[in-house]
Image (cartoon, rainbow, N blue to C red):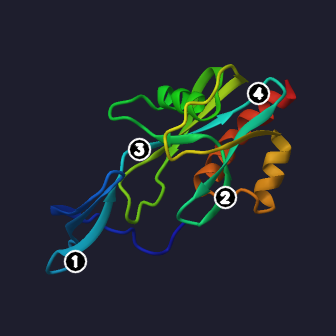
Amino acid sequence: MSSSPRPQRWKKLDGRLLLQTRIFDVQSVDFHHPAHPAPREFLLINAPDWVNVVALTPRHEIVLVRQFRFGMNDLSLEIPGGVMEGGEDPVNAAVRELAEETGYVGEKACLLGSVHPNPAIQTNRCHLVFVRNARRTRAPAWDPNEEFEILSLPVEEAYACACRGGITHSLVLDALLLFRPHWEKLRRS
């Protein structure tokens, strides 16, 4: 058990919009800690929730996409995913993103879990979804700035690739972590 005291909750006060973009807003928000005499300013990034999809084919391969990522200025190997529409259910968003990015559709989609991408400064969550029996049934429908290499790897090869550093997107690694118990159960059956 921890020997240090439990942190106290800060009280969120007023905020103001500093920057509005098409993909996120930056807000200045004051928070007050019970032990501090005055509130302190913190910057928050408000973005829509995201979804990432572990799509498993009948041959027990994980559907992957390779795409250029501007933040890292390089190609990134990932699972399909994207921004959720306002009010959209995470499982429905995952099925939609999978079909749009890869042309794959599947069965029995279920939520693996939800994570906070960076709770220090971001207010959104990423929902991780598992889709079974994914098959390519149509052409992808990419947005104007999207371009993907679509591939699939046997599950254990995908995990080995991640362990070698071939998959570095933290949300993809989260999804693989949450998918692992499902995979263990499937391969034993």
> On the picture, is 61 further left or further right than 125?
right
Q: Which residue is mark 1?
A: 35
Query: For the residue labelled by badge 3, is the local secondary structure a helix, a strand or a loop?
Result: loop
State the separation of the CA atoms marked 4 and 1.
54 Å
Q: Residue at x 43, y 47 (%)?
A: 125
Badge 2 or badge 4: first in the primary sequence: 4
Q: Residue at x 68, y 19 (%)?
A: 137
Whether residue 51 appears in this view of the structure is no
Q: Amino acid at mark 3?
A: Asp
Q: Which residue is mark 3?
A: 49
- Image height check: is 183 above or below 22? above
> On the picture, is 64 further left or further right than 81?
right
State the separation of the CA atoms marked 3 and 2.
23 Å
Q: Which mark is residue 57?
A: 4
Badge 3 or badge 1: first in the primary sequence: 1
Q: Do tag 2 and tag 1 residues touch (Cβ < 8 Å)?
A: no
Q: Which residue is mark 2?
A: 75
Query: For the residue labelled by badge 2, is the local secondary structure a helix, a strand or a loop?
Result: strand
Q: Amino acid at mark 4?
A: Thr
Query: For the residue labelled by badge 4, is the local secondary structure a helix, a strand or a loop?
Result: loop
